[in-house]
Structure formats: structure tokens, C-alpha cells
Amino acid sequence: MTLCALLEPVLGLAEPILPNLAAADTMWMVRLNHWQECWGHPPSGMELVSINKTIHCVGRISRIRLDGWIERLDQAGHKQPAGTLASSLQGHTAKDSTMLWRTKSSKRQWRLDFSQSHVMGIINVSKDSFSGDGTTVEQAIDQGLAMAEQGAAILDIGGESTRPGATEVTAEQELNLVVPVVKALASQLSIPISIDSSKPEVMAASIEAGAAIINDVTALQGLGDKHKAKETLDLLAKSDCPIILMHMQGEPATMQRAPHYHHVMAEVYGFLAERITFCLANGIKKERIIVDPGIGFGKTAEHNLELMRRQRTFRGLGVPILLGLSRKRIVGKLSGEDRPEQRDRASNLLAAFGCLAGADIFRVHDVKGACEALKVTRGWWHKH
């Protein structure tokens, strides 16, 4: 069981967006999961609580006292909690990173600078999309070229819908849909192409066709298919492509029937932390990993809102964060718009909030509108 430390800066009205996280008086909300009695008593302001038959240490503490607590734990030989707390704190305070990689098949070098946010354009080569934007192969190519012109930094191509109750697509069908699009766009554009698939054979063919990023909604688990999971892992361990690990409770066909969490932030964070640890143990470097909390994937509206409001907590994982909420049901619930294709303006507003809360990549249908919203947001708080 992975020990997780959730740290969230307590933001005041005077400085709501860019707190000085290194300041001694900065207050942090802390939640250290799976606390062990042998680690002693936590400092004042923290308390031990039992949740789902495990002990958690939760509370508020200033930065200077947090540093002191970490040091005391380390000196007492409690390396695990000390290291976990220190690692999460480092993730929050680290400078913006730049992701550099080279794809072996095309021998091209790619760069994503996370000192600014990036827009990922969604291209669904399927008629079964929940958002009404499914396209043919020819339309998808034209759509990708237009999105690149509008400012997309990444294009995400998918050939199988993950909406609840969607029709299952075979590997052969998916290959016929996505590979021609990947090949055409990769040959014409200078931005990385992402393949949205959980099938290793589709990933492999897409990488060969020019895809430079893998977006796997199963987080390399293969939806319980151990053979598929191992095949995926073997493929990606040999690749240099960045990997997007998403949280999903259950599987697409059943994920929205009765989503339940004891503590949604802790469980989603813990899952992503465990998948990062899994990747590191299997030859995938942390510098290649992006995480996605999975808005709408096995979550109620209340779960989604909690994850979105407290998104800054995921900075503690120390990797870029992708936020995918474009046209989703939660957007309709907040805006009152029943038609997914009419939810772009509300989606872009939520993307702006997400930018302020620390997300790095925004997966959207309306590239032009999202780019404008994020540009205004960055200009408002003088970060370009």
C-alpha cells in the first residue's frame, strides 16, 4: 500500500492565486494516509483519525513547522513518512519543468514547456462520441489541421468512445480509424500527436505512424486484462513517449452506475501516486509521466467538483496535470445546458479556473475559445 501525503496550500484572500509556498508562515492542509503508531505523535494542529479502518494524520500546519516535522521524523529513523512529506512538498515548490523527448520511429524531438499551460485538441474518429463531435477519417484530418492553426499544442486522437454504455470497438476497427489520421497529421504538423487508446496494438501502430504521446484511460492497467497490461507496459518501457495516466473508478460501461469514495481526493491522489510508483519500478521515468484525475470517469457531480476545486493538491505528485472536462456532464450541470455541443463557453470558463488552480494541459473540443480563455487568464495574473 503506497503511503501518500496530500498537501494543499491554504490560500488567503490577499494572495489567492500565487501564494509564496516557501514562506515560513504559509499554512498547509496536510493529510498523510496510512499513519503508523510507531511514528509517534503528530505535531500540534494535526490529529489522527480513523477512516475506512485505517489511520490518517490530518490537519493544518505552517511551512516552518512542516519542515521541522519532516526533519524530526527523518532524525528518528522514520524515513518513509519523512520522505513522502518532503517529496510532496517538493512537487508543490519545484519550478516549472520542460518535457523533452524524441520519438524513435520518426526521429523527431519534441518539447513541452510547462511554464505556461497548453491546449490539447480532441479528435474523435467515431460516431459514438458523447459530445456529438465524432468524425470520419477525412474530417478528422481536416479538423486536426484547423486545431493546430487555432493554437493547439497537442492533438489527441481517439477511435473508441469511453462514455457509459458505448459500443465496444475491436482493435482492428480502432486501427482502421486512428492510424490514417495519426499518419496524416504527424507528417504535416510540428506539434505532438497523442493517441487516446488502452489497446497495446493500437498504441504500437500509432507510435509507428508518428504518435508522440500515449493517453491511457486505464493508467496501464488494461481494464483488468493482465496480458494486455503487460503488453502495454513492455511497449511503453521501450518507448520515450510521455504517458498520461488517468484515474477511473470501474470501467467505462459501468463507471457511472454508483460511484462511491470514502474520501475522493485521497483515493484519486493515492491511485495516481501508486501508478507513478509502478511506472518507476518498471523502467518508465517520472519525466515522462502526466496525470489526469479523470473528471467524469466514475465520479458524481460532487466528486468532480471536489477534485476541481482542490486540484492544486495534485501538484504534490511532481508531474504535469491534465484537466479534461470539456463538454462533460458536470459542465452541463453547472451551466444548465443539456446539449454537450453547446457547452464550450462554460467549458472554457472552467479551464480558466483550472489554470489558476495549477493544471498544465487542457483537453478541449473548442481549441480557439480555450486558447483565448487561457491567454486572458495568464495575462490577468501576469504569467506568460
Image (tube, grey):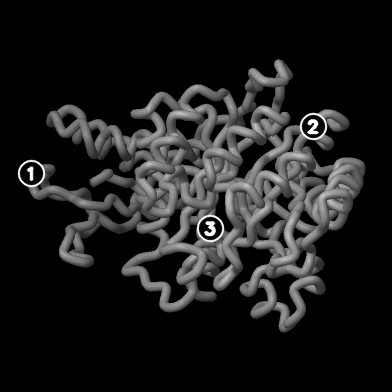
Q: Is residue 376 visible?
A: no
Q: In the displayed structure, does residue 367 sit left or right of residue 303? A: right
Label 2 Cα crowd, 10 Å radius (few <14 / some 14-19 / many 20+): many
Disc 3 versus disc 2: distance between alpha carbons?
27 Å
Residue at 58% x, 54% y is: 170
Q: Nearer the viewer, residue 51 or 231?
A: 231
Task: Determine whether the residue tagged by mark 2 lies in a helix, strand or loop.
Answer: helix
Note whether 257 is above or below 53 in the view shown: below
Q: Residues within 10 Å of mark 1 (few under 14, many from 20)?
A: few
Instruction: Report the residue marked by disc 3.
Output: 294
Image quadrant where residue 334 sits: bottom right
Quarter of the image where one finds residue 185: top right
Query: Which is more foreground, mark 3 or mark 1?
Result: 3
For disc 1, the marked residue is 38
> Which circle's residue, 3 or 2, is located before the other in the chain?
2
- From this viewpoint, is residue 59 visible? yes
| Residue assigned mark 2 | 186
- Residue type highlighted by circle 2: Ala
- For residue 359, side relative to residue 275 (left or right): right
Q: Position of residue 253 (x, y in %)?
A: 50, 69
Of 63 and 377, which appears nearest the observer? Answer: 377
In primary-sequence order, the first of circles 3 and 1 is 1
Residue 228 quadrant: top left
Residue at x-position 56% and y-position 72%? 165
